[in-house]
Amino acid sequence: MAPKQHRWLFGLLLAAYSTFCAEVLAGSDLFPFWHVWGVVVTWPLYGLHALVLLTWVYRHGPRFSTLMAAGALFGLYEAYITKMLWKPTWGALLTVADVAIVEVVVLLWWHTWFSFITPVVLAETLLTTSDTIRAALPGLVRWVYTSAWGWVGLAVLGAVVQTINSPTPLTSLASGVAGVAMLGALTLLWKRATRGRQYTLGDVLPGPRAWRVLVMLLLGYYGVLGVTIYPQHVPPLWPGQVVIWILYALAALLFWRGVRTPLPARSASLRRVPTQTVLVAAAALLLALPVVKAWAGASGWPLLLVWVGGGAFYLAAWVAAWRSTRPARAP
């Protein structure tokens, strides 16, 4: 196991990756590393979710099903903390049983892939010698995270989403530069602190005692933010909160089914993703941000296409993850 200071540094970096991919690329917070709320609330909140859930997944053996379940649990913070699954600030497109149905699908898709899976893969790729998370992903998705074109595609997708919520092309570019600079500085700090030491993902995750402390801290954030952020938007127990409880139960059930499914056999290690590939993707993001903003302007139709496509992909991925937990039939 890595020294305690290296494990804490890894957690800080994973939190930063998650915050950038989730908040900056979504355009929800263009400069989360540069103001008090971002440093005190946003950054730790994403980090606690990512560390707690990744450690939970890793201890049980990463599978596509458990990654999807953990991503859903991550995204469901948009209920009791932000209340966006009940009453989004932009106005719900469709409300059924007090729940914003469209936002549930879109936000769970975004958080599963951009708050959890993508930053976890990024951290595993840049900071460790492991490939356990990428190996747990299905073929086409795995290709995205092991190819230069895949990473560039993710960067362009993030540019499209980010620019819709950015006022000007210059603001988009400034947000991208500030975020990438922070991630680059922290990653360089990791390289210098570890001095070439090679760690697996398991080496840098928190131990059982530290994990329990992180869980308690995360629950503390839920308690404080739950009663301070739009408390008036929490619906009655029936039906609004019960529907969210059902979603929590489905995610827990998917995780339980996943850990009861044997781990698939691995034929060989995956090809390592060179650091240069991630740098090319970062450059593509910075170049695409002002271009996409200037091209799309204030139009929301590119974002609509992304949301529809992302929502459809999420539902298909959920079905695939559920089906992957089915016990093998006897010949």
Image (tube, rainbow, N blue to C red):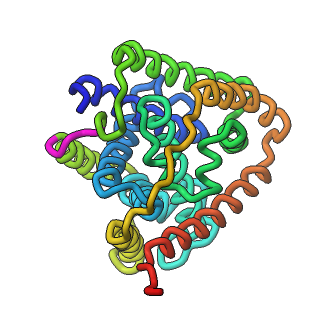
Residue 327, percent across and down?
41, 79
Q: Quadrant of the N terminus?
A: top left
Count of marks, rendered view: 0
**Residue at image location 28% in from the left, 46% down from the top:** 221
Question: Which one is in front, 91 or 152?
Answer: 152
Question: Which one is in front, 27 or 188?
Answer: 188
Residue 251 horizontal side relative to residue 319, left or right: left
**Residue at image location 44% in from the left, 57% down from the top:** 67
**Residue at image location 39% in from the left, 55% down from the top:** 62
- Answer with the quarter of the image where residue 253 lies: bottom left
Residue 11 seen from this side: yes
Residue 43 horizontal side relative to residue 273, left or right: left
Residue 320, percent across and down?
55, 70
Residue 162 seen from this side: no
For residue 247, above or below residue 1 = below
Question: Which one is in front, 50 or 135?
Answer: 135
Q: State the residue lying farthest toward the left.
A: 209
Residue 198, percent across and down?
37, 26
**Residue at image location 33% in from the left, 75% down from the top:** 237
Residue 30, percent across and down?
57, 32
User: What residue span does the magenta drawing correspond to?
Assistant: 205-209
- Answer with the quarter of the image where residue 195 lies: top left
- What is the magenta segment's predominant secondary structure? loop
Residue 129 horizontal side relative to residue 237, left or right: right
For residue 243, above or below residue 43 = below
Residue 296 horizontal side relative to residue 36, left or right: right
For residue 50, above or below residue 72 = above
